[in-house]
Amino acid sequence: MLFEAQPTVDLREQSPLALAFVGDAVLELLVRQRLVETTRMQPGKLHSTATRYVSAHAQNRELEILTPLLTEEEANVLRRGKNATKATVAKHATAQEYRASTGFECLLGWLYLQNRNDRIQQLFEALWQQYTPEA
C-alpha cells in the first residue's frame, strides 16, 4: 500500500465509522490501481467501472465471497462495522447493503491501520478473481 499507518489511538477504541472512512479509500485505491494496471480505459470509463466494485450494492455482494475467508477476529471487526449507526443511507442501496458495505470498509480500514497490507492484498485478490460486477 501507499503509506504505513502509525496510529496513536487504540484501534479497539476507534469508531467503526472512522475505520470505514479509511477503508473506503483503501478499496477505492485498490480498484483504481488494478483497473489502470490491467486496462486501457479512458478516465470516464474507469470511473464508471470502478463504481461497479465500490458501491454499497457491490460491496455487499463482494462480502459473500470474502466472509468465508475471514478469521474470527476479522469477522468480529466486520460485525462491529455492520452494527455501526449512520445517520444516512445511500440512495442507491438497501439498508442491508449499506450496513454490509460499512462493515467491509471498517474491516479494510482496521487492517490498513494495523499495517496488514498483505492481508488486504489477499482478500482483494480473492475478490478480484471471483467477483463479476453487474453491467
Image (spheres, rainbow, N blue to C red):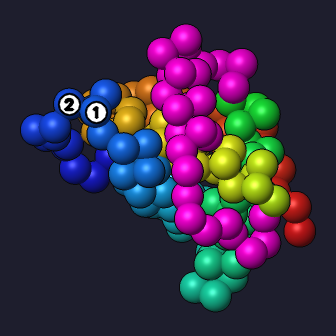
Residue 21 visible in this rendered orientation of the protein: yes
Front one among 16 and 72: 16
Q: Is residue 1 left or right of residue 127?
A: left
Label 2: how many residues lie within 10 Å, few (<14), some (14-19) or many (20+)?
few
Which residue is tagged 1? Answer: 13
Q: Which stretch did the figure color magenta?
A: 67-93
Q: Which residue is located at x 41 percent, y 57 percent? A: 21
Q: Is residue 50 left or right of residue 3?
A: right
Q: Is residue 109 left or right of residue 103?
A: left
Residue 129 visible in this rendered orientation of the protein: no
Which residue is tagged 2? Answer: 10
User: Answer yes or no: do the residues labelled 2 and 1 have beta carbons within 8 Å?
Assistant: yes
Q: Which residue is located at x 36 percent, y 44 percent? A: 15
Is 82 included in the stretch rendered in magenta? yes
Q: Residue 14 location, x and y as percent?
A: 30, 39
Query: Which image quadrant is residue 115 in?
Result: top left
Front one among 104 and 118: 104
Q: Residue 9 location, x and y as percent?
A: 16, 37
Q: Residue 118 location, x and y as percent?
A: 39, 28
Q: Which mark is residue 55?
A: none
User: Tag 2: residue type?
Assistant: Asp
